[in-house]
Amino acid sequence: MKIYYQLTEQDYVDFNLFHMNNSKSLKKSILVQRLIGPLIFIMSCFIAPKITNMPLWYWTSIMVVMSMLWFAFYPKQIERRCKKQVLKMLSEGQNRSLLAKGTLLVDEKGIIKSNEYGESNLKWNTINKIEVTNRHIFIYQNAISAIVVPLSSFGTKEEKEQFIALLKSYCTTI
C-alpha cells in the first residue's frame, strides 16, 4: 500500500505533545516539576516573614494560592513551552526534507519512506509501536522518534482503517 502525504510544522508539534503526554519518563518528570513549585512556595512562606514585616498567615495564604495556581496551570505551560521550542527548532537551519511531500510504501518487507531529498527503509522488527490519534498515526521506530502520518493523507475512513490494519498485520513487535 502506498500513501502520499505532506507534514506541516503542526504535525511535528502534535507528535511532540503526544509523546510528552504519553511517555512514562516525561510524565514523571513533569509531575516532579509540578510538585517542586508548590514545595518552594510553601517553604518560602516561612522565610518571607523573617525578611519582611508581614505575618506568617499573610505569606501562607499568598503561597497557598500560588501553589494551587502553579499546580493547576503548570501542565498547560509546559505544553506551550514545548510547542514554542519545536517551532523554534523547525525554524533553525534547513528543514525542507522534513516538510517535503513524501510517500510511504508499506509491504511485507517493511516501510519505505521517501521524498525528493532521500529514502529510508524500516524493517518490521524495528517498529516499537503504532499509535493512532484523532489526527495522526505515529509509527515509532524507537523510544523517541516516529514516522508521522497525518490522517488527512487518506481519502476515506476505509483507507485509513485498511492502512492501520496492514501496519498491525505486519508489525509483530507490538
Image (cartoon, rainbow, N blue to C red):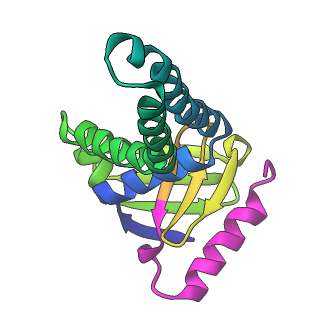
85 lies above or below 3 = above
Q: Is residue 161 magenta?
A: yes
Residue in the picture at 49% in, 30% down = 37
- Of residue 126 and residue 74, the one placed in the foreground of this image is 74
Question: What percent of the width, then of the height, locates residue 57?
Answer: 48, 32
Left or right of residue 122: residue 94: left
**x and y, in percent, of residue 121 in the image:** 54, 44
View extreme (top): residue: 50
Q: Which corner quadrant of the image does residue 32 belong to?
A: top right
Q: Is residue 121 magenta?
A: no
Which residue is at a point 60% across and 87% down the rendered structure image? 158
As drawn, is 54 to the left or to the right of 38? left
Would you place residue 62 above or below residue 3 in this image?
A: above
Quarter residue 53 falls in: top left
The residue drawn where x is 38% and y is 46% is: 77
Identified at 29% across, 55% down, the residue is 9
Left or right: 12, with 3 as reference point: left
**What span is in magenta?**
149-174
